[in-house]
């Protein structure tokens, strides 16, 4: 439910309810912010993706080099190479790079949604639906 407070009507989740007529889904300032972010992060996103791929390649090279130095059965060598500290550190670097890339990719996806929603809302306004 909701309750009254000195600041107005408060929803059950503690967020102040704003009357529909005062609410604007996505204003032009927010649209501009989304477009600027998309326009200025193309290269950085590509660099993060490249770094992620580079870290994955480096980890595989390290694992392969360790595997080659070892003796024993293939299964034993694979297990030992895959559990080595050097390979583990390389995989940590890879996962860190992946997290950075995915965070930016997700943020860019959110900004694309903002732009698309703004377009849709404005198309509706032009047609008199909103």
Image (cartoon, rainbow, N blue to C red):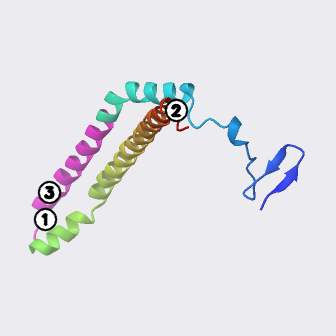
The x and y percentages for residue 95 are 35, 52
Q: Earlier in the sequence, mark 2 or mark 3?
A: 3
- Residue topped by disc 1: 70
Q: Nearer the viewer, residue 105 or 44?
A: 105
**In the image, what residue occupies the spot 85% across and 43% down?**
7
Seen from this angle, which residue lies furthest front? 128
**Picture layout, residue 23 above or below residue 74:** above
**Picture layout, residue 81 above or below residue 72:** above
User: What are the residue bounds of the magenta stretch?
Assistant: 47-71
The x and y percentages for residue 114 are 47, 37
- Residue topped by disc 2: 125
Q: Earlier in the sequence, mark 3 or mark 1?
A: 3
**In the image, what residue occupies the spot 27% across and 66% down?**
83
- Residue topped by disc 3: 64
Contact? badges 2 and 1 (CB < 8 Å): no
The x and y percentages for residue 13 are 72, 57
């Amino acid at each position: 439910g909701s309750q009254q407070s000195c600041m107005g009507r408060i929803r059950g989740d503690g967020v102040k309810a704003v009357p529909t007529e005062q609410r604007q889904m996505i204003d032009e300032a927010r649209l501009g912010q989304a477009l600027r972010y998309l326009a200025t992060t193309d290269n950085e996103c590509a660099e993060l993706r490249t770094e992620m791929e580079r870290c994955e390649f480096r980890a595989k090279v390290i694992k392969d080099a360790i595997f080659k130095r070892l003796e024993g059965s293939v299964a034993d060598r694979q297990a030992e190479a895959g559990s080595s500290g050097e390979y583990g550190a390389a995989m940590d670097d890879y996962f860190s790079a992946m997290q950075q890339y995915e965070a930016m990719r997700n943020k860019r996806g959110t900004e694309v949604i903002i732009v698309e929603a703004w377009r849709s809302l404005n198309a509706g306004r032009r047609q008199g639906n909103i």
